[in-house]
Image: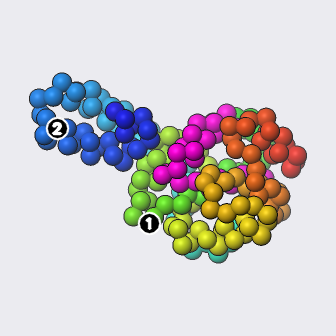
Amino acid sequence: MDAYNDGFIHSAQYLYDTLKTYFPNSNYLNTAKIEIQKIDGFLSSNRNNHAIRFYPTKKVTSLEELVAPYKGKVVYLDFWGTWCGPCRIEMTYVSELKKHFANKDVVFLYLDMDDDEKENIWINYVNFYGIEGEHYRLNRTQIQSCWEDVKKAGGETNNYPTYILFNQSGKIVNAAAERPSSREKLYRQIEELF
């Protein structure tokens, strides 16, 4: 199912239901059902994963406020969106990055920009792919104050994905950090902060 493979898991159930309604005798129905069961299995298995933490959507007035709970640790912030193809590609490299820093005080913080009505899509996407870390979602208006902080730190704004590094004091030290796919370059950037 393309919806499954492309990461549009929210569409998969709709497509399956449509197939079942309009083509109840289709040869593809059993295959589609198996794929839907796989999706449900992935979603269920990660709903109880305590390493995936969602925080209530709230008005965040600054990046400083967002990273304040993580003082004393290096923070790698990922500005992303469920609708962003390059963001989703980069997510495939995150597991390797986290393994590299498994015994270090690094917090992986994800700031998703999606409209309020897409909150369930965001939660399901994170659970389906098992993206462990601290997860926040802001809408297009709410996220602007965070982009202003990126601009003040010399970074570009409104580019997805964007990666920011904060030192243990909660200050931006790199407003244009490397992507997870750049592996060693990013590892060096993070290691320099210890």
User: Does residue 27 appear left or right of residue 187 in this picture?
Assistant: left
**Residue 158 placement (x, y as % from top left):** 62, 62
**Dot 1 surroundings within 10 Å: few (below 14), some, or many (20 or more)?**
few
- Label 2: which residue? 20
Compared to residue 60, the image places residue 174 above or below, namely above
Of labels 1 and 2, earlier in sequence is 2
Q: Are marks 1 and 2 in contact (CB under 8 Å)?
A: no
> In the visual, does 97 lie left or right of 144?
right
Q: Nearer the viewer, residue 38 or 44?
A: 38
Asked whether residue 86 is drawn in magenta, I would say: yes
Using the numbered discs, state the Cα–Cα distance from disc 1 to disc 2 in whole angstroms. 30 Å
Q: Residue at x 43, y 49 (%)?
A: 124
SS at circle 2: helix
Asked whether 191 or 189 is in front, the reply is 189
Q: Which residues are magenta?
A: 74-97
Q: State the image quarter where residue 156 is shown.
A: bottom right
Q: Amino acid at mark 2?
A: Lys
Look at the picture and state if 151 lies above or below 23: below
Q: Which residue is mark 1?
A: 116
Q: Secondary structure at mark 1?
A: helix
- Determine whether, in the image, residue 30 is placed left or right of residue 76: left
The residue located at (25%, 39%) in the rendering is 16
